[in-house]
Image (cartoon, coloured by chain):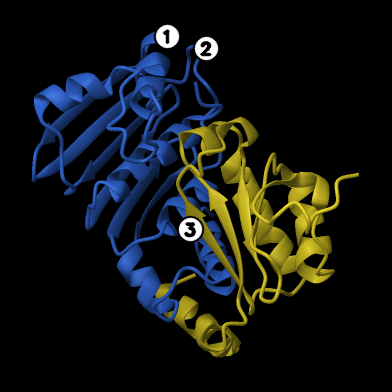
Chain colours: A yellow, B blue
C-alpha cells in the first residue's frame, strides 16, 4: 500500500468521527502503557481493543488512546473507559478476555462490569457481587 | 524483565515522548542472530549525573508518581542486555536529546523473543503528543527493508491518529509493508 492509497481509504471513511467529537459523543478507551502496563501485556490489550472495535463496526465512534501509568500497577493492564452519559471508570487486569467483555457489555451493552472496576465511581453506583 | 524485546522498545520510546521530543528516530536492524535497535530523540536529555541515577531501579524523578521509589524502564534494558550477552549504551546531552543503543543476541537462549514489530510500530506511532517519528526496519532474513514517517502517515490519515478508524487503516498500512 502506498501513502496515496492510504489517503484515499481515509477519505472514503465517514466523517462521523469529527461530528461525534464535537458533539461530545465519542467513546474513549484509554490504555495505561507505562513500564508496568507494558510488562503486564498492555500492548496486547491495546491491539485486542483495536481488533474488536473493527470487528464490531465501532471504528467511527471510538477513540483509542494511550497514557502512562495510572498508579494502579498491581492491577495492570489498566484501562479507563469513557462512554457518554455513563460514569468514567478504570478497569484493572484487562487481558484479552476482559477487553472483549468491556467492548460487548460496557461499550455496546452500556452496562458497567462491576467486579472489574478498580477505581472511580462512588460505592453507591457499583454493586459488588 | 519485559516479556518481549518489542515491549522494551515501546518502553524506551515512550520515554522519548515523555521527554518532550519533537523528533524521534527508531532503527530496528535484524539479522539471523542479532537484533540491533537505536532510539534517538531531541528531547530534554539528561545530565551525566541523572543518567547514572536512571540506571538504578530505585531511582525516579518522583514527578509522575510522588512518593514512589522505582523507575524500571532503563534498568530492565540493562538487565536484559547483560544477562543475555547483548549490549547497551545511552548517550545524553541536556537540552539536546538522548540516544539509546540496544543490541540483542538472538542466538542466546535467554534472550526474550523479539515480539511483534508491526504491533510495536502501531503503538509507538499512536502515542499522545505532537512528535515526528522516523522508523526504519531492516530484516535480512525476512528480506524486509522499509521506513515509516509519523507526520506523513498522520497527514494521509486526515491529521489524526487517535480515532480507531485511523488506527485500523494505519495497522493495515504497516501490515502491507511487511510483505
Picture coordinates of residue B147, whole percent (x, y): 34, 56
* Vertical placement of residue B87 versus B95, above or below: above
Which numbered dot is residue A77? none
Q: Nearer the viewer, residue B55 or B125?
A: B55
Picture coordinates of residue A103, whole percent (x, y): 76, 61
Say left or right for B154 vs A24. left
In front: label 1 or label 3 = 1
Alpha-carbon span between mark 1 and mark 2: 8 Å
Q: Are marks 1 and 2 on the same chain?
A: yes
Say left or right for B86 vs A61. left
Q: Residue at x 54, y 31 (%)?
A: A39
Q: Residue furthest right?
A: A129
Q: Residues within 10 Å of mark 1 (few under 14, many from 20)?
A: few
Label 1–label 2 contact, CB within 8 A: yes
Task: Tell me the residue that label 3 is attached to.
Answer: B177
Mark 2 secondary-structure assignment = loop
Chain for numbered disc 2 = B
Task: Tell me the residue that label 2 is attached to.
Answer: B110
Q: Are marks 1 and 3 on the same chain?
A: yes
Q: Residue at x 54, y 11 (%)?
A: B109
Mark toward the start of the polypeptide (1 vs 2): 1
Q: Residue at x 51, y 39 (%)?
A: A71
Chain for numbered disc 1 = B
Amino acid at each position: 500500500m502506498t501513502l496515496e492509497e492510504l489517503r484515499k481509504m481515509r477519505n472514503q471513511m465517514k466523517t462521523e468521527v469529527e461530528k461525534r467529537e464535537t458533539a461530545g459523543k465519542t467513546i474513549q478507551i484509554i490504555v495505561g502503557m507505562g513500564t508496568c502496563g507494558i510488562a503486564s501485556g498492555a500492548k496486547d490489550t491495546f491491539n485486542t481493543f483495536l481488533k474488536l472495535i473493527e470487528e464490531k463496526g465501532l471504528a467511527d465512534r471510538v477513540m483509542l488512546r494511550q497514557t502512562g501509568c495510572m498508579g494502579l500497577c498491581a492491577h495492570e493492564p489498566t484501562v479507563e473507559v469513557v462512554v457518554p452519559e455513563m460514569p468514567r471508570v478504570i478497569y484493572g487486569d484487562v487481558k484479552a478476555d476482559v477487553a472483549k467483555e468491556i467492548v460487548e457489555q460496557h461499550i455496546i451493552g452500556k452496562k458497567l462490569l462491576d467486579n472489574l472496576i478498580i477505581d472511580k465511581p462512588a460505592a453507591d453506583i457499583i454493586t459488588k457481587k | 524483565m519485559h516479556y518481549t524485546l518489542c515491549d522494551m522498545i515501546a518502553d524506551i520510546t515512550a520515554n522519548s515522548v515523555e521527554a518532550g521530543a519533537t523528533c524521534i528516530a527508531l532503527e530496528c536492524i535484524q539479522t539471523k542472530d542479532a537484533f540491533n535497535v537505536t532510539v534517538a530523540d531531541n528531547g530534554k536529555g539528561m545530565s551525566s549525573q541523572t543518567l547514572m541515577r536512571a540506571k538504578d531501579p530505585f531511582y525516579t524523578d518522583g514527578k509522575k508518581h510522588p512518593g514512589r521509589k522505582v523507575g524500571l524502564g532503563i534498568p530492565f534494558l540493562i538487565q536484559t542486555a547483560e544477562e543475555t550477552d547483548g549490549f547497551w549504551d545511552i548517550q545524553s546531552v541536556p537540552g539536546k536529546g538522548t540516544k539509546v543503543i540496544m543490541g540483542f543476541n538472538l542466538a542466546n537462549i535467554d534472550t526474550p523473543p523479539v515480539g511483534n514489530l508491526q504491533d510495536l510500530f502501531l503503538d509507538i506511532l499512536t502515542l499522545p503528543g505532537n512528535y515526528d517519528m522516523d522508523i526504519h526496519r531492516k530484516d535480512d532474513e525476512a528480506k524486509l527493508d522499509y521506513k515509516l514517517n509519523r507526520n506523513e502517515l498522520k497527514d494521509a490519515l486526515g491529521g489524526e491518529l487517535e480515532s480507531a478508524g485511523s488506527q485500523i487503516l494505519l495497522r493495515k498500512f504497516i501490515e502491507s509493508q511487511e510483505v
